Image: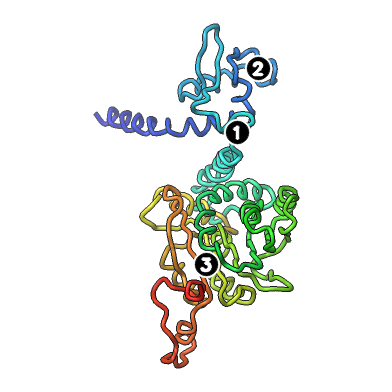
């Protein structure tokens, strides 16, 4: 009976592994352009001869593809890619975002999570290689642009904007979106990764109002003017929790008194996307140069300590527990509370109101 229980328990866990197969299959097909090779019905030996990929490995990949419905079996031993399931991984219709997400998951997240036993035993954490993986991470971060941009545009509409700064700008997607609506506004993108900056410059050649600089957000500041809007997107997990309030305090030096900071960050311990955000957080804390995600209490504590009002904290991708919020330099009442000065003659600011909304 004990042996039977052992076998059934193992069988149950084996079934759970099936959910991983579509991700693995899509990643391999994306990396090797196999979905394009099978766009029209072809035999395995024809594709093997054309690509040089070993027949046995290719045959095994094809059989998995049929099982997970990525490929369809056709008469004469031929196979064709299912456009219904894999169109985003094929040719001109392919999605750079989907490919980048698969690449990040399979080459970054899963290998790190598999190292967990060694990391915990040795007490030696992994180190994130910005040069090697910076571009693919920038690509996946840009996926949030679609969900966040509507909120950003709505808030900035009809405002007198002169300068926008994007800290940790990645490939510059946000700035290009904003530049299309605000062609006369100066846009500055800052990122620590030289390769990412070069990629952003190349992609932004048609936008004369955008400039990119290599810089560390901890000590970078604009030389000649303050910003109306600063984008702080997907950056907190690169900054040690003890240094987050310091970064925000430094930004007082170049955010206008009535300016805004746009924050996008995955959050820990929220009511949405608990499994994903917990796994995401596990990936970060396994590295010596990446850090735990903030939870709501920490975000409020950090912004209050650095004298910012936080408002409009909302989820934009519930499955991944990604949130957006706005920060604005604190009102005179809050600053008075921080310094202990008399604020009885100041006009109070209601909950959720900011210097920006009050001046509108």
Residue 230: image tag: none
The alpha-carbon separation of the residues under discs 1 and 3 comes to 38 Å
- Reading the image, the residue beneath label 1 is 94
- Which image quarter is the N terminus in? top left
Q: Residues within 10 Å of mark 3 (few under 14, many from 20)?
A: some
Closest to the observer: 294 or 143?
Answer: 143
Seen at 36% across and 55% down, the residue is 271
The vertical placement of 180 against 185, above or below, is: above
Mark 1–mark 2 CB contact (< 8 Å): no
- Reading the image, the residue beneath label 2 is 48
The alpha-carbon separation of the residues under discs 2 and 3 comes to 51 Å
Mark 1–mark 3 CB contact (< 8 Å): no
Seen at 67% across and 70% down, the residue is 219
Q: Is residue 248 left or right of residue 210?
A: left
Seen at 54% across and 58% down, the residue is 153
Q: Position of residue 266 (x, y in %)?
A: 48, 56
Q: Residues within 10 Å of mark 2 (few under 14, many from 20)?
A: some
The vertical placement of 202 against 79, above or below, is: below
Q: Residues within 10 Å of mark 1 (few under 14, many from 20)?
A: some
Q: Position of residue 137 (x, y in %)?
A: 60, 49
The alpha-carbon separation of the residues under discs 1 and 2 comes to 23 Å
Mark 1 or mark 3, whichever is nearer to me: 1
Q: Position of residue 280 (x, y in %)?
A: 48, 51
- Reading the image, the residue beneath label 3 is 241
Q: Position of residue 99 (x, y in %)?
A: 59, 38
Mark 1 or mark 2, whichever is nearer to me: 1
Q: Earlier in the sequence, mark 1 or mark 2?
A: 2
Task: Kindly state the secondary structure of the residue where label 3 is placed.
Answer: helix
């Amino acid at each position: 009976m004990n042996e039977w229980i052992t076998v059934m328990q193992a069988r149950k866990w084996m079934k759970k592994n099936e959910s991983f197969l579509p991700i693995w299959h899509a990643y391999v097909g994306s990396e090797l352009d196999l979905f394009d090779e099978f766009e029209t019905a072809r035999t395995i030996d024809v594709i093997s001869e054309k690509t040089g990929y070993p027949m046995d490995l290719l045959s095994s990949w094809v059989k998995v593809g049929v099982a997970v419905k990525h490929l369809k079996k056709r008469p004469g031993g031929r196979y064709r890619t299912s456009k219904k399931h894999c169109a985003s991984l094929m040719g001109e219709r392919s999605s750079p975002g989907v490919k980048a997400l698969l690449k990040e998951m399979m080459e970054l997240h899963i290998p790190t999570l598999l190292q967990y036993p060694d990391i915990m035993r040795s007490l030696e954490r992994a180190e994130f290689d910005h040069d090697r993986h910076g571009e693919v991470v920038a690509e996946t971060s840009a996926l949030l642009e679609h969900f966040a941009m509507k909120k950003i545009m709505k808030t900035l509409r009809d405002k007198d904007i002169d300068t926008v700064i994007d800290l940790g700008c990645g490939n510059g997607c946000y700035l290009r979106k904003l530049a299309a609506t605000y062609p006369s506004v100066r846009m500055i993108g800052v990122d620590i990764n030289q390769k990412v900056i070069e990629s952003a410059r190349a992609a932004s050649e048609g936008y004369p109002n955008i400039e990119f600089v290599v810089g560390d957000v901890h000590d970078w500041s604009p030389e000649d003017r303050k910003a109306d809007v600063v984008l702080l997107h997907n950056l907190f997990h690169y900054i040690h929790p003890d240094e987050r309030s310091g970064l925000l305090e430094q930004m007082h030096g170049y955010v206008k008194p009535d300016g805004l900071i746009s924050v996008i960050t995955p959050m820990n311990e929220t009511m949405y996307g608990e499994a994903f955000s917990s796994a995401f957080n596990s990936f970060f804390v396994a590295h010596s140069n990446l850090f735990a995600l903030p939870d709501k209490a920490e975000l409020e504590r950090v912004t209050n300590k650095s004298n910012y009002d936080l408002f409009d904290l909302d989820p934009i991708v519930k499955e991944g527990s990604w949130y957006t919020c706005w920060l604005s330099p604190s009102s005179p009442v809050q600053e008075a509370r921080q310094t202990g000065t008399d604020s009885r003659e100041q006009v109070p600011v209601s909950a959720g109101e900011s210097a920006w909304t009050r001046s509108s």
